[in-house]
Image (cartoon, grey):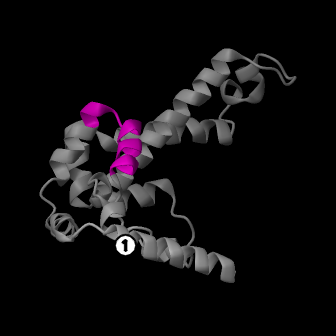
Amino acid sequence: MDSWIEGSDDTPYFKKLTSKLFKLNYFIEADKKFQYQSLLKAPYDSLNDFVHTKGGSHSYTALNLSNCPRFRESTLASYITTCLSSCEVVAIGLSLRYPRILEPLPLNEKFGLKLPPCGFFTHWDVSCLANVIDSGRLEQIRNIIKDDEQVQGIRNWILSLPDLTEDEWQTQIAERFQDARAD
């Protein structure tokens, strides 16, 4: 997967991608607890059927009951439902692959404007991500990942750091303005 992220490999086909993901422990657990693989496949199949026009029932004409452009509330509602489902399964996948993103930390208080590239989120960021995931599934995900030693180790280290002082904040702000002027 890293070679795909780096851009040296083509985007993997869905089946190949899921076969790799569902060899990872957290994905296996999520599939046992709430059938994540089926949950992931549903919006993919739906979108795939329309993108590749799988027969007349998945065509523009069928969606709009016309071969002319027009607005239909039911088509919009179907689109929104599929978008929300897609967002949820992606958020779940990210949370299972990178469990640290569900661990809210006081990053601004500890690092100010110089946030480290640690992959952790602030309380607000975690709240936004969590709002996309069904509350029951979110609780199950949190139970799956709660004892991740790497996440807990970094979390404890960040929490042990002192909060920035007002002087440190002012120094960072001044540096930021100085950098902006140099550009």
Taking depth in this image into account, of 154 and 75 the one nearest to the observer is 154
Q: Residue at x 37, y 74 (%)?
A: 168
Residue 54 in magenta?
no
Where residue 86 appears, x then y in whole percent? 49, 40
Q: Residue at x 77, y 20 (%)?
A: 71
Q: Is residue 103 placed above or below 70 in the rendered structure?
A: below
Q: Residue at x 27, y 36 (%)?
A: 137
Taking depth in this image into account, of 38 and 30 the one nearest to the observer is 30
Q: Is residue 142 left or right of residue 94?
A: left
Q: Residue furthest right?
A: 68
Q: Residues within 10 Å of mark 1 (few under 14, many from 20)?
A: few
Q: Specify the quadrant of the image occupied by residue 78.
A: top right
Q: Secondary structure at mark 1?
A: helix
Where residue 83 appears, x then y in whole percent? 55, 36
Q: Is residue 108 left or right of residue 141?
A: right
Quadrant containing the N terminus in the rendered view: bottom left
Quadrant containing the C terminus in the rendered view: bottom right
Residue 126 in magenta?
yes
Q: Specify the quadrant of the image occupied by residue 73.
A: top right
Q: Which residue is mark 1?
A: 167
Q: Residue at x 33, y 49 (%)?
A: 123
Question: Can I make out residue 17 in this image?
Answer: yes
Q: Which residues are magenta?
A: 123-137
Could you tell me what secondary structure mostly forms the magenta stretch?
helix
Q: Is residue 178 placed above or below 100 in the rendered structure?
A: below
Q: Is residue 94 left or right of residue 99?
A: right
Q: Residue furthest bottom?
A: 182
Where residue 103 appears, x then y in whole percent? 26, 54
